[in-house]
Image (spheres, grey):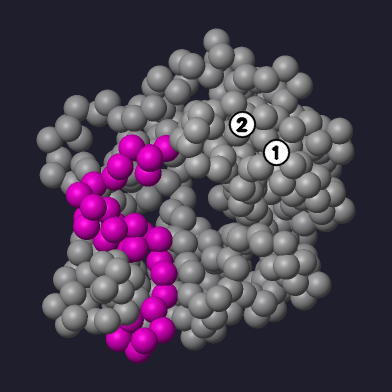
């Protein structure tokens, strides 16, 4: 299972598109963190297949900004490491940070302890500072760019997370180029689906994805391929014939997030300010409230009738419960914005995949066909 600990509701940035709720100086107490780790490991043991492979869990640290609680993060990590080893559980560790507090010593510690780090930077300063500003209103790009130096190259232990929004999408292609120039090899485009995307932004978004796809293909031709989630994912899904059940949303079943107070939510996006009773599914002290959890899990999917006839349905992320809930108010109904995004990402991925396959690009074939 995947578990996320929201160590604090505080943050030193005030990003316009943040879904983590109102910022306040409320951090997770140590006893809550310890109980959360115990809960995560116990659930991993409970749901493991008898006689199967070694049980495994992913433990993520999130916020707010988790590096504001650096000592708590390290203490929770050390306890989780020790306990998972004692229980025979393989533990994958992740951290998502806004990078403003990420210096060389912290980057070294995260690397030495096997963390995969999500690095929130929206590319160049024009794209980033449009929406990722400090509490005082200043830009945060310069500090993030300095921290990025610790995660360059193919062996870096993290990926850049770029939020694509109608107010910054015009800078997307040049921002991807800015990252590629700095030898950033793992990039995740994370659209703000909850935003209002006026019709005039659709052509800008499509053109930005096409330009990004062309840059992606060029990195393969130069022998230094970059990974971009919306392209890699669509290429792999086409090769395998559609999303498998294990690829789809784990909302509340295989994925759980824990607020600073210890409350359980089905996804990190649903924690918010820790006040939405409609998606709260228990707490680490008493466990899951199955009367709340089961109905939410049962609603996962997409019941929009017109989607059932779409030829792109097997490759479309219409099933993401947290995005559906945030955009339509219903776990099982996809929005038009998601539909548009899936169409343009599939089209861009198919174009560059066809070109690289025809060229018999060795790096592309090795990556996607294991040749």
Write the residue at 59% across / 26% down. Answer: 46
Image quarter of the C terminus: bottom left
**Image mark for residue 87:** 1
Write the residue at 64% across / 53% down. Answer: 93
Residue 28 % position (x, y): 81, 38
Neighbours of disc 2 within 10 Å: few (<14), some (14-19), many (20+): some
Quadrant housing residue 282: top right
Where 364 falls versus 302 (above or below)?
below
Q: Which residue is mark 2?
A: 45
Residue lying furthest top in this view? 291
Numbered disc 2: secondary structure? helix
Where 295 falls versus 217 (above or below)?
above
Residue 200 % position (x, y): 30, 58
Asked whether, in this view, residue 234 is left or right of residue 8, the answer is: left
Residue 222 seen in render = yes
Asked whether, in this view, residue 288 is left or right of residue 310, the answer is: right
Front residue of 370/180: it is 370
Asked whether, in this view, residue 173 is left or right of residue 133, the answer is: left
Image quarter of the N terminus: top right
Front residue of 348/285: it is 285
Residue 106 within the magenta-colored segment of the rendering: no
Where 295 falls versus 22 (above or below)?
above
Numbered disc 1: secondary structure? helix
Residue 33 % position (x, y): 79, 37
Residue 10 seen in render = no
Quadrant housing residue 32: top right
How far apart are the two marked residues, 2 and 1, measured between alpha carbons? 8 Å
Front residue of 289/189: it is 289
Write the residue at 47% across / 81% down. Answer: 180
Q: Are marks 2 and 1 in contact (CB under 8 Å)?
A: yes
Neighbours of disc 1 within 10 Å: few (<14), some (14-19), many (20+): few
Highlighted range, magenta: 220-249
């Amino acid at each position: 299972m995947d578990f996320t600990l929201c160590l604090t509701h505080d943050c030193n940035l005030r990003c316009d598109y943040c879904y983590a709720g109102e910022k306040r100086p409320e951090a997770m107490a140590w006893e809550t963190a310890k109980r959360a780790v115990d809960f995560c490991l116990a659930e991993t043991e409970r749901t493991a297949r008898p006689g199967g492979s070694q049980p495994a869990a992913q433990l993520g640290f999130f916020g707010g900004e988790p590096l504001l609680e650096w000592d708590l993060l390290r203490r929770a990590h050390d306890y989780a490491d020790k306990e998972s080893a004692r229980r025979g559980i393989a533990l994958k560790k992740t951290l998502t940070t806004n990078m403003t507090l990420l210096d060389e010593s912290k980057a070294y510690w995260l690397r030495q302890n096997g963390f995969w780090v999500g690095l929130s930077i929206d590319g160049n300063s024009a794209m980033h500072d449009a929406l990722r500003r400090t509490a005082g209103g200043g830009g945060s790009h310069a500090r993030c760019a300095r921290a990025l130096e610790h995660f360059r190259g193919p062996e870096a232990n993290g990926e850049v997370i770029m939020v694509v929004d109608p107010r910054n999408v015009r800078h997307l292609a040049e921002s991807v180029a800015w990252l590629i120039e700095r030898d950033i090899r793992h990039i995740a485009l994370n659209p703000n689906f909850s935003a209002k995307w006026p019709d005039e932004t659709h052509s800008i978004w499509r053109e930005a994805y096409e330009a990004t796809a062309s840059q992606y293909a060029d990195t393969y031709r130069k022998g230094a391929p970059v990974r971009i989630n919306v392209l890699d994912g669509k290429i792999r899904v086409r090769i395998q014939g559609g999303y498998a059940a294990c690829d789809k949303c784990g909302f509340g079943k295989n994925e759980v997030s824990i607020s600073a107070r210890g409350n359980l939510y089905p996804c990190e996006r649903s924690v918010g300010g820790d006040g939405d009773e409609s998606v709260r599914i228990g707490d680490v002290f008493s466990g899951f409230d199955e009367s709340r959890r089961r109905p939410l899990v049962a609603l996962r999917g997409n019941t929009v009738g017109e989607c059932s006839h779409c030829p792109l349905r097997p490759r479309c992320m219409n099933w993401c419960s947290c995005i559906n809930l945030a955009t339509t108010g219903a776990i099982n109904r996809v929005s038009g914005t998601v539909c548009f995004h899936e169409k343009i990402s599939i089209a861009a991925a198919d174009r560059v995949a066809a070109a690289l396959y025809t060229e018999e690009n060795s790096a592309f074939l090795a990556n996607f066909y294991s040749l």
